[in-house]
Image (cartoon, rainbow, N blue to C red):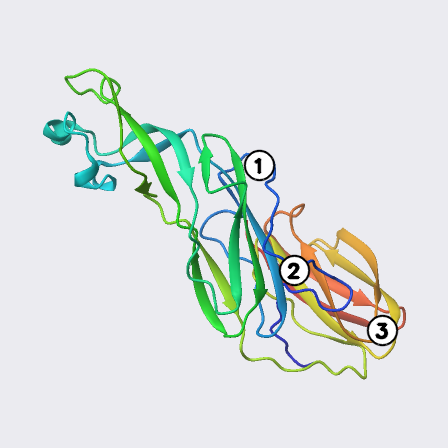
Amino acid sequence: MKKFLLSAAAIGIMAINVNAQCTPGNIQADFQPLIATSLPAAAVGQPYNTTILFKAPSTLTISAADIPSNLLPAQIAPFIGLLPASFTVGVDAMTVGPVTGLPSGLTAAVGGGTSFAANEQGCVGITGTATTGGNYTVDLGVQYSITLDASALGLPLGGSFPIPQPIPSPQAKTYNLSVPTSIEELDATKFDLTDNAPNPFSDKTNILFSTPKQTNVELTVFNMLGKVVFQNKYQAKQGKNNIEFSADKLSGGLYIYSLSNGSEVRTGKMLVTK
């Protein structure tokens, strides 16, 4: 069976709407998918579309070093040595963008504005067609507008002091994005299946297969005890097809999957990391 490092782009049965717009969701975590995880893989020459959801936090844990010295209010500066190693401050707003680190051919657009009040929802839509391969670190360019409460910080003066301009996020708000460059073609003259990619994965993976004629296929996923945890039928067109599989209802672990066209069965393994 030939190998194919595939993308999150829709091929065959999974169509996507390619544009840079996104719609904010209703999430509880600050970012979804979680920061420092991998975005769905892209592929050179294939349309790509993914969305990052986020919610601005109401508080932020920082250290004095996270605040540029030239931004410290004059009243606070003399007492900088009295601040604890880390402390919590209120967030007035979070700004997102510009998004950097994308491969050539992909662009990002922030939905819902560029500045978000505490607990306000927003999103980043990444779309386009990658023209270069490799591994990329995508940075969302997150900054925070904060206010220092002198009394809460144990300083010998009263009042609240807003920092005059946003400070960079103390923790990097980045994602990994892979654009495979080594691709081997499936044999479209027969029922053929590749390894899913990305693998391991925490959110979504793609299962690429081929079939010599239009047919119905059934995807079944088993846990290591042999229990069926997912089963669904798809209509496949002649040639190459892609099934985007979501692990949102699965716990972390190793799973076996099978793809059947009614007369033949192909199998593979997937590793979910959560």
Q: Name the residue under label 2.
A: 18
Q: How many marks?
A: 3
Q: Say which amino acid is labelled 2.
A: Val
Image x and y of residue 236, in percent: 83, 68
CA–CA distance between discs 1 and 3?
A: 41 Å
Image x and y of residue 130, in percent: 55, 70
Tell me if residue 198 can be seen.
no
> Closer to us: mark 1 or mark 3?
1
Q: Dot 1 lies on which element?
A: loop
Image vertical order of residue 243 relative to residue 194, above or below? above
Q: Is residue 41 left or right of residue 245?
A: left
Q: Quadrant of the N terminus?
A: bottom right
Residue 16 or residue 210, whichever sits in front: 16
Residue 37 or residue 30, whichever sits in front: 30
Image x and y of residue 134, in percent: 47, 72
Mark 1 crowdedness (10 Å alpha carbons): few <14, some 14-19, many ≥20: some
Q: Say which amino acid is labelled 3.
A: Glu
Q: Say which amino acid is labelled 1.
A: Ile
Image vertical order of residue 141 relative to residue 137, above or below? above
As drawn, the residue found furthest toward the left would be: 78
Image vertical order of residue 210 relative to residue 117, above or below? below
Q: Dot 2 lies on which element?
A: loop
Q: Do the residues labelled 3 and 2 touch (CB within 8 Å)?
A: no
**Which residue is found at the position 89% from the left and 68% from the top?**
262
Q: Is residue 45 left or right of residue 74?
A: right
Q: Name the residue under label 1.
A: 27
Image x and y of residue 154, in percent: 20, 20
Q: Dot 3 lies on which element?
A: loop
Q: Which of marks 3 and 2 is nearer the N terminus?
A: 2
The mark found on residue 264 in the picture is 3
**Which residue is found at the position 59% from the left and 41% from the top?**
24
